Image (cartoon, helix red, strand yellow):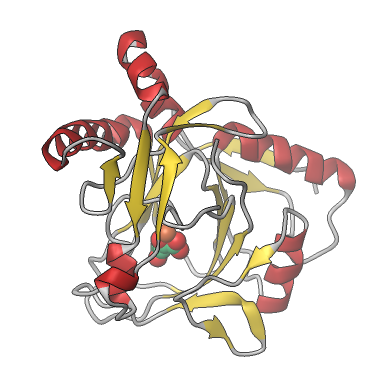
């Protein structure tokens, strides 16, 4: 089998064919996967049907799986969280977000293996390098010096954690990717984020604009899930959004995240 990487949009995402993720991967293919991952930020593998143990083994090729606070691990696989029975009323993921933005070191990579898929239930990713690069140089200069306080309010609500007990962290609004060296906009929704040292009103005006600018259709890949799909994304330079348009239909995805660096 020959590894084949095909871009999915002009801005973010690539499909990878010619590889089985649950079989030993040759160094040459792994190198190619790594460079495709850094280039396209989100990789889609169809028809993989990766089982939990194989997902953990594949994840270890990329880093150290983390057990996410506030989320319930899968029995026998503490590294895996099974996303299932997510209700529209309480979901924390139907909003553009970074995983773990309210923790000191958000995960660097997240990986989903689709077990059961509904009609609908797509996931979208945005390119946060471009979200930054397409701003004017003068605004970029201002943003380079700012920090944002993130609060895990939505996730806390979903997991019934009191608002005062939800984690918070302060991160640079513009972070430099430790592997590519490119700058990416690490923005948050005004509900979960506030520019450090700014008034609420000032912060909302800026964050609203940056957030909106990040996720215009020309900067987004939207994935329609099929059972067996495996998707991995770079949480240092993308945001994502889980569309909840599937009512009570069953939707099950197995999720692993990898330990990340402190954003700088
Ligand atoms: O359910 C999804 O499609 C993605 C959920 C999500 O935000 C995540 O796994 O981090
Ligand atoms: Fe997420």
Q: Is residue 120 at all visible to an observer of this figure?
A: no
Residue 126 location, quadrant: top left
Q: Position of residue 68 (x, y in %)?
A: 53, 70
Q: Quadrant of the C terminus?
A: top right
> Horizontally, is 192 left or right of 78 in the view?
left
**Residue drawn at (60%, 90%) of the image:** 75
Residue 178 on image: x %, y % = 64, 34
Question: Which residue appears at 59% of the width and 72% of the height?
Answer: 67
Establish if 99 lies above or below 178. below
Residue 190 drawn above or below residue 155: above
Query: Which is nearer the eye, 217 or 136?
Result: 136
- Quick check: which quadrant has ligand 2? bottom left
At a point 47% along the width and 35% down the height, the residue shown is: 12
Percent of width and height locating residue 250? 36, 81
* Residue 221, quarter of picture: top left
Q: Where does residue 9 sit, x and y in percent of width and height?
A: 44, 33
**Residue, far left:** 201
Q: As drawn, is 217 to the left or to the right of 37?
A: left
| Residue 105 in view, yes or no | yes
Numbered label tally: 0
Q: Is residue 246 left or right of residue 145?
A: left
Quarter where residue 46 is shown? bottom right
């Amino acid at each position: 089998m020959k590894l084949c990487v095909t871009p999915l949009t002009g801005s973010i995402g690539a499909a990878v064919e010619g590889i089985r993720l649950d079989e030993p991967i040759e160094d040459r293919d792994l190198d190619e996967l790594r460079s495709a991952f850094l280039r396209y930020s989100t990789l889609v593998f169809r028809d993989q049907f990766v089982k939990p143990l194989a997902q953990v083994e594949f994840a270890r090729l990329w880093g150290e799986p983390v057990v996410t606070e506030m989320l319930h691990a899968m029995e026998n696989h503490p590294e895996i969280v099974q996303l299932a029975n997510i209700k529209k009323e309480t979901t924390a993921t139907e909003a553009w977000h970074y995983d773990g933005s309210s923790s000191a070191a958000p995960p660097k990579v997240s990986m989903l293996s689709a077990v059961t898929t509904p009609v609908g239930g797509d996931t979208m990713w945005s390119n946060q390098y471009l979200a930054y690069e397409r701003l004017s140089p003068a605004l970029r200069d201002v943003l380079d010096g700012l920090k944002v306080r993130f609060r895990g309010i939505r996730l806390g609500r979903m997991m019934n954690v009191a608002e005062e007990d939800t984690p918070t962290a302060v991160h640079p609004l513009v972070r430099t990717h430790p592997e590519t060296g490119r700058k990416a906009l690490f923005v948050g929704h005004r509900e979960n984020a506030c520019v450090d040292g700014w008034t609420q009103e000032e912060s909302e005006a800026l964050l609203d604009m940056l957030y909106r600018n990040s996720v215009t259709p020309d900067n987004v890949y939207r994935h329609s899930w099929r059972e067996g799909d495996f998707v991995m994304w770079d949480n240092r330079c993308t945001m994502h959004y889980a569309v909840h348009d599937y009512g009570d239909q069953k939707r099950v995805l197995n999720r692993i995240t990898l330990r990340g660096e402190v954003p700088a």
